[in-house]
Amino acid sequence: MTDRTSPLVVVGVDGSDDGLRAVRFGTGTVLRYGGELLLVNAVDDTLMAGAWGVVYDPEVLQAAGVTANEQAKDVALGMGLTEDKIRTEVVMGSPGGVMSRLSEVADLVVVGRRAATGLERMFVGSTSVAVVANASCPVVVISAAAHPNPVGEKGLVGVGLTAEPGSEKVLEAGFVQAERLGAPLEVVHAIQPPVGLFARKLSPTQLDEQVRFAKGGIEALAEKLALQHPGVRYEVIVATDSPINELVTRSANYDLLVLGVGESHLPGFGLGGLLRGLMAHAECPLFITR
C-alpha cells in the first residue's frame, strides 16, 4: 500500500465464501491502518448477451449485486468498521476488468480465490488471474477454504524471491508487510537442480557454490532493507528444490506470502507458471506486488 493520507482498499464482492473472506481481510486492513473500504460487485455484462438463448435482466443482476454488497457491508460493520468508512458500488463489466481499473486509484485490491480442492485447484479463477496480471497496485489473493483463519495467528511472513529483475522491490514489500504484522520475515529462494536426460548435471560442489552465491546476494540486499526496518527479524533461506514445492510447503506456516509479478512488456502476460501454481496451491494469503 502507498503512503496516502487516506488509503483505499478495494474488495471484490460476489456473494461467495471466498468473497466474504476477502471482505474480512480488507476490513481488517482498514481497521489496522485506517483509510476507506470500497466493496465492489461487478456485473458481468457478457451475461446479458445471453447463453444458450437465455437473456438476463440487467435489473435482476443489479439487485443481486446490491444484495451481495449489503451482505459484505454487514460483515465489515460486524468487525467494527464504522459506516462512514465503507462504500459500496455495483459496476457493469467483467470482474477482472473492473477490479483492474479500480486498482489504478486503490492502494490495495483484495480478491477471493475461487479454487478449493482437487482438480479445481489446477484452474485458478479467471478473475484473480486477470486482476493480478493487470493491477496497478498490490493485490491480495485469499481463499475461504485454503486459509480461513484470521491473518496473524502464525506469526511469520514469507517472501519468495526469484532471479528475475525487481527482486529488491519484492523483498522490500516483504519487510513492509512483516513490519505491519509485527512478525519475523522468512526470505526464501529456491534453486531448481537441472533435471532431464539432456540437462547439464551439477556436482554437489557446484550446487553448493550456487547456493552460497545466491544467499550472499540476497543477504546483501536484506541488510540494506533491515536498516530501514530495524524492528523486523529475518532469515534468508536458499533451498535446492523446485520453487513451487518449496514455497507451497512453507506457505502453511505463513500469515502472508509476498510475491512479485514477473517483468513483462505486454499487459496481462506477466504471470508465469510459478505464480499461477502458488495462486492455486498456497496455504496462506498471497500479497502480490510489482
Image (spheres, grey):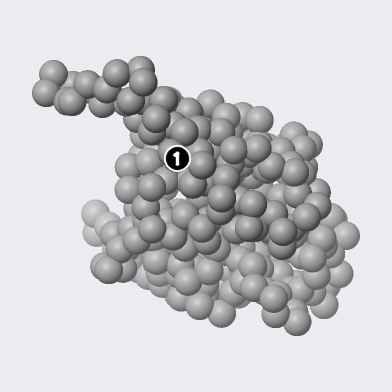
- Seen from the viewer's position, the closer of residues 226 and 33 is 226
What residue do we see at 74% from left, 79% from top?
Answer: 6
- Seen from the viewer's position, the closer of residues 18 and 104 is 104
What residue do we see at 47% from left, 33% from top?
Answer: 212
Q: Is residue 128 visible?
A: yes
Dot 1: few (<14), some (14–19), or many (≥20) neighbours within 10 Å? some
Asked whether, in this view, residue 153 is left or right of residue 38, the answer is right
Q: Is residue 130 visible?
A: no
- Seen from the viewer's position, the closer of residues 245 and 167 is 167
- Seen from the viewer's position, the closer of residues 246 and 119 is 246
Q: Quadrant of residue 57?
A: bottom left
Asked whether, in this view, residue 79 is left or right of residue 256, the answer is right
Measured as percent of width and height from the top left, residue 247 is found at: 50, 33
Query: Three-letter amino acid code at disc 1?
Result: Ala
Asked whether, in this view, residue 160 is left or right of residue 107, the answer is left
Q: Which residue was labeled with disc 1?
A: 214
Measured as percent of width and height from the top left, residue 70 is found at: 70, 64
What residue do we see at 33% from left, 25% from top?
Answer: 206
Measured as percent of width and height from the top left, residue 151 is found at: 73, 44
Provide the secondary structure element on which disc 1 rests: helix
Measured as percent of width and height from the top left, residue 243 is found at: 41, 34
Q: Quadrant of the N terminus?
A: bottom right
* Rendered position, 84 above or below 263: below
What residue do we see at 47% from left, 55% from top?
Answer: 167
Q: Quadrant of residue 184?
A: top right
